[in-house]
Image (cartoon, grey):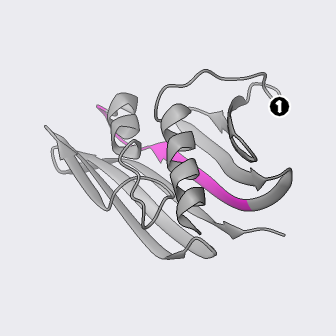
Amino acid sequence: MDKELVEFLIRAKKATYAGKGAETTPSREKSHDLIYRDGEYMYYDTYLGTGKFAGEEALWIKDTQYWSMNYIGRVTGNNFSGDFLKEALLLVPEDKPFRGPEKYTNGDYTYDCKIDGDYKWFNGRETISYKGAEIYECIFHGGLVE
């Protein structure tokens, strides 16, 4: 993924879910949909559910699909903080612009993210722990689409 695309994807992620961006008209019954456009690029994030959720992020270039990532996650314990998750996701790294950083801690919360592969074909798992006990997990995978 070239630098311009990575920069767009990071801006898009920061302007939508992680950045508490406004939702657009739902594409399906009770879905949450967020869109970000800049020039010839468009990013679309759509998901269902909250405590247990599933969704997809996708990237288009000049109205042609280019890249997609699917995810499914759930809250597994007490003291989950959606704000902490969004805080971690705002730190999306340039070398793996899929979810959050490999590790991030703030107070009693720790975010961990393991990824195999690159933007062409990848899979990963992120978790949040509170005082050392895992309270959230999300599995994701994606890559280029044609």
The main secondary structure of the magenta stretch is: strand
Front residue of 58/130: it is 58
Where residue 70 sits in the image (x, y, percent)? 65, 56
Q: Is residue 122 above or below residue 82?
A: below
Front residue of 36/39: it is 39
- Quadrant of the frame with the N terminus: bottom right
**Image check: 132 left or right of 23?**
left
Q: Is residue 44 above or below residue 28?
A: below
Q: Secondary structure at mark 1?
A: loop
Q: Which residue is mark 1?
A: 27
Where residue 85 sits in the image (x, y, percent)? 38, 39
Front residue of 58/110: it is 58
Q: Is residue 65 above or below residue 95?
A: above
Which residue is depicted at the point 34% across and 44% down? 88
Q: How many marks?
A: 1
Residue 42 colored magenta?
no
- Quadrant of the frame with the C terminus: bottom right
**Image check: 78 left or right of 41?**
left
**Image check: 55 left or right of 134?**
right
Which residue is depicted at the point 57% across and 73% down? 122
Q: Is residue 115 above or below residue 81?
A: below
Q: Residues within 10 Å of mark 1 (few under 14, many from 20)?
A: few
**Image check: 98 left or right of 89?**
right
Residue 69 colored magenta?
yes
Where residue 12 sits in the image (x, y, percent)? 57, 41
Amino acid type of the residue tagged 1 in the rendering: Ser
Residue 17 visible in this rendered orientation of the protein: no
Residue 53 visible in this rendered orientation of the protein: yes
Which residue is depicted at the point 45% across and 65% down? 96
Q: Quadrant of residue 24?
A: top right
Magenta highlight range: 67-79
Which residue is depicted at the point 50% across and 48% down? 10
